[in-house]
Amino acid sequence: GIQVEQSPPDLILQEGANSTLRCNFSDSVNNLQWFHQNPWGQLINLFYIPSGTKQNGRLSATTVATERYSLLYISSSQTTDSGVYFCATDWGGYQKVTFGTGTKLQVIP
Amino acid sequence: GAVVSQHPSWVICKSGTSVKIECRSLDFQATTMFWYRQFPKQSLMLMATSNEGSKATYEQGVEKDKFLINHASLTLSTLTVTSAHPEDSSFYICSASREGYEQYFGPGTRLTVT
């Protein structure tokens, strides 16, 4: 099956700093999503981005499907951004989603 | 946007009992629903895929007799953990999708088996 690796695994930021999270996948994918899992476990859908770039407030994402990676940018980080960020890919024609290994982000005041 | 709900949000049960978790798509008809399991500090692992009116497809290593999945309608899927044991304690998350669209995830159900 497809391998989805995320880096870095852990990240600590000072409030107000910027960061880039990376997602590498080992095979061609139909689409890619980014999620934020809050401390209560709820998955929040951030982006549905099979290719190109999208922006939503302080967050933006870019997927380069031909090179098999996606990036999530967080600017002016806030403590509420803390949690785990997952990318997930839909591949194989069956809508089976494989989640990445996750990046645990902690934003400190 | 599309909303998926799960019930209950958390449940504590005794070893040997069965627990049913519901997943509902509130404002759209889901052709496919998925069930995931997440252990502490780990990623989500797909357990099974279900299409309305047909048997679920389980991932390798997932016991279909232990994790019973029913997808009775286009808006409801249920996961029943039968004869639960402490090792079944986990966070269970469902998702729902329409063909060609992204998956929408429920808020998850935390199961603790004592």
Image (spheres, grey):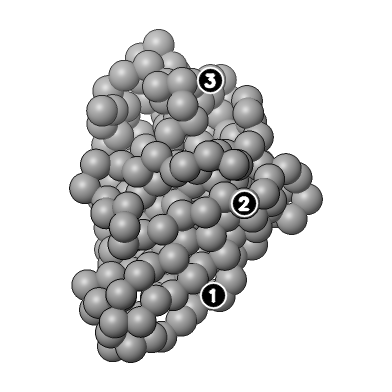
Mark 2 residue element: strand
- In the image, which is nearer the foreground, mark 3 or mark 1? 1
Say few, some or many: other residues with alpha carbon within 10 Å of mark 2 (under 14 / 14 to 19 / 20 or more): some
Q: Which residue is mark 3?
A: A51
Lateral position of residue B79 relative to residue B22, left or right: left
The Cα atoms of the two marked residues, 3 and 1, are separated by 34 Å
Residue A20 visible to an observer of this rendering: no
Residue B9's disc number: 1
- In the rendered image, residue B64, in percent from the top left (x then y), is placed at 32, 52
Answer with mark 2 or mark 1, whichever residue precedes in sequence: 1
Residue appearing at x 24%, y 41% in the figure? B60
Q: Which residue is mark 2?
A: B72
The Cα atoms of the two marked residues, 2 and 1, are separated by 21 Å
Mark 1 residue element: loop
The Cα atoms of the two marked residues, 2 and 3, are separated by 35 Å
**Relative to residue B66, is residue A97 depicted above or below?**
above
Same chain for the residues under marks 3 and 1 in the image: no
- In the rendered image, residue B104, in percent from the top left (x then y), is placed at 60, 46
Say few, some or many: other residues with alpha carbon within 10 Å of mark 3 (under 14 / 14 to 19 / 20 or more): some
* Farthest right residue in view: B27
Residue B39's disc number: none
Say few, some or many: other residues with alpha carbon within 10 Å of mark 1 (under 14 / 14 to 19 / 20 or more): some
